[in-house]
Image: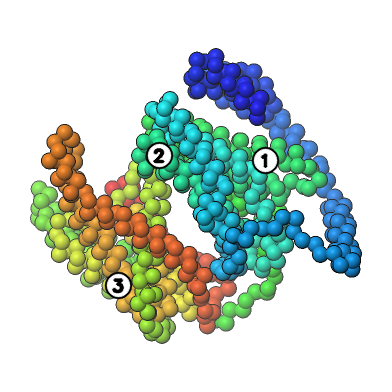
Amino acid sequence: MLLVAGGYLLSYAKTAGDPLKAAVLFFNAPATRYIPIWGQIKGLCAFLLEDKPLEAALCLLVLILAGAALIYIIWNIHADFYEDAMAKSEETAELLEKAQSGKSAGIVYKRGKDRSEKLRRDGLRHGAGANIFFFKSLYNRFRFAHLGFFTKTMETYLAIAALVSLYCRFTENALGILPVALTLGAVAFFRAMGNPLEQDTKMDSFLLIPENTWAKLFWSLMGGTVNCLLDVLPAILIGALITGTGLLASLAWVPLIVSVDFYATNVGAFIGLSVPVSAGKMVKQIVQILFVYFGLLPDIAIAALAIVFGHTMVGMLCAAALNFGLGFLFFGLSPLFLDPKGGKRKQGVTAFHGDLKLAKRHFSLLGLALFAILAVASLLQLAAGGIAGALYPEGEEPSWLLWLCTFAPMYLVAVPIGLLLMKRVPAAPREGRALKPGRLISAALISIFAMYAGNLIGTLILALIQAAIGASSANPVLAYAMDDSLWLRVLVMVLLAPAIEEYIFRKQLIDRTCVYGEKLAVVTSAAAFGLFHGNLSQFFYAFALGLVFGYIYLKTGRLRYSMALHMMINFMGGVLAPALLNSIHMETLSAVDLNNLEVLEDLLLRLIPFAVYVLSLIVLSLVGLVLFIINIRTVRFSVSELELPKGMKCKTVCGNLGTALFLAGALALVVLSFLA
């Protein structure tokens, strides 16, 4: 490290104090292209940019040969697991002998270094089964952190961010948060190279816990990812404060940094589990470096294209999505080396005490009912729209007529037809139970979190799709939410829609499917609710809310609770938020005279209510997240009378004509939303 630092300082002096030119001169010198493997990777990219195809082809050939040689060496290394087991047994026997001799001699063995009395020792109180590794990670974090919050990693990130930010502020202020984010990403990357998942996978309890190996590894991985997020956030905020960069522009780098840590962690776990022990630590590190560096090459390409075309934000999000995707790929492979059976033990096939054909017929009828609602409503809406267009050829239809053409066919014709089909499936009504006020408030906060978390996911996915195909998805509800007719919005969006949708998707669907499994009924209801909206803008948050509403109805048997929560959500998104936006007069913002103090004061006064609303939602969503984490461990599903075995659930629900028609109809509406 000292040699590298010294070489960089010499280059810095040669370039008259220009840090970027010094980095190019030192790290990208032509001689570095002859460094084995890493140099050829650099050379391949550099020669392609310099329009030297012959040299680039030579670098590629060297890389292929080197990769083939490494694969051959690793493939032919025979792991002598018997020898390793014998060595471990001898080591264990020696330790036991020392312990027994020490005990007989009256010797008391103590820890080499006593732990501080300031450490928390109140015990781990959260988690059950596989997710114990997630809660253990967070518990140990706050247990060993200074003041219960500042870990050593966080303090290191804060120091790095502060130093880099101060340097950029007083030398290269135009660079903004970019150097801080890249430095933190590099540090997170090299920190993850140490394979942090080994702390869990090497424990005997990891294999002894009778849970799916993928589930255990997933929760362990989520613990590390959340820790990385908590460590990075304060550093990014400090960097934004010192460099004067906007908060949102700075926070946009957080997903990329966390995704780099996520990818490197999964690669490290995969290499640690797949490469034989006898291969040696050096071979493991070489293979890991190859996998990681090759995996980050697409990131470099995406970042370069995004900067060149002026879409840095979209490029960073795409790179983060790619890192998470590749990370999940290695995550899916790792448990195969840890436990070939994935932690599953033969328990015998659960007997199904019912008629499987009848179950498929029931799900087919329910799917057909939902398809009928979609199809009949769409056809009648097109017909009503055509009639309205004929009556008002100039396109000046009154607002009430547009609402009537959209919702009257749905609620007056399509829904009754669908309910008639659903009635052909026998129902098992739930037993009514009261929900305490405290539980209802917790459910409301969790619903707010589910709505905005799903909305963020949907927005991110739509942004990626738009960047890829150049088309955006239309949200049909948005036009009605911004309509001037307040009484129509309240009547339809706050009262009618929640009441009818809850009656269909919670009361009718869950009552008719819970006999085949309570969890199956809730998930099926939520998925149908999300698909029924017919666009990606609403699918993700509708699905998340469907899970919350469905579980509440399942446990209480009373529709009033989920209906009230649904009305609250629709009021916030369909009445309150649009009213606050309309008060700002968004269309006049571009013409605001920034030099006129009176105009600016008026604008500020109009912005304050909306800002308070947004900040309140953020706080409520965070509280909902905490409540969700606390309450998720209390979620329980009882075994139903005709519970479908695991291997039959998807085939029974989806492997029928009615469900296939409903899925096809919903998919057609999603495609049309991009073409509209």
Query: Residue placed at 58% from the left, 73% from the top?
Result: 645
Q: Is residue 336 above or below residue 624?
A: above
Label 1 to label 2, Cα distance in Å?
33 Å
Label 1 to label 3, Cα distance in Å?
53 Å
Q: Is residue 313 above or below residue 97?
A: above
Q: x and y percent of residue 219 in the render?
A: 58, 59
Q: x and y percent of residue 6 in the render?
A: 62, 22
Which-is-in-front pick, marks 1 and 2? Answer: 2
Mark 2 residue type:
Ala
Dot 1: within a 10 Å radius of its alpha carbon, few (fewer than 14), some, or many (20 or more) residues?
A: many
Query: Residue placed at 46% from the left, 68% from the top?
Result: 523
Dot 2: within a 10 Å radius of its alpha carbon, few (fewer than 14), some, or many (20 or more) residues?
A: many
If you read the primary sequence from the N terminus, does the residue marked by circle 2 or circle 3 appear first? 2
Label 2 to label 3, Cα distance in Å?
41 Å
The quarter holding residue 263 reads: top right
Location of the N terminus by quadrant is top right
> Which residue, given by chain and number where applicable, does mark 3 sit on?
564
Secondary structure under badge 1? helix
> Which residue, given by chain and number where applicable, does mark 1 sit on?
288
> Is 335 on the left-hand or right-hand side of 321?
right
Query: Residue placed at 37% from the left, 42% from the top?
Result: 247
Tell whether label 3 touches label 2 (CB within 8 Å). Answer: no
> Which residue, given by chain and number where applicable, does mark 2 sit on?
240
Mark 1 residue type:
Gln
If you read the primary sequence from the N terminus, does the residue marked by circle 1 or circle 2 appear first? 2
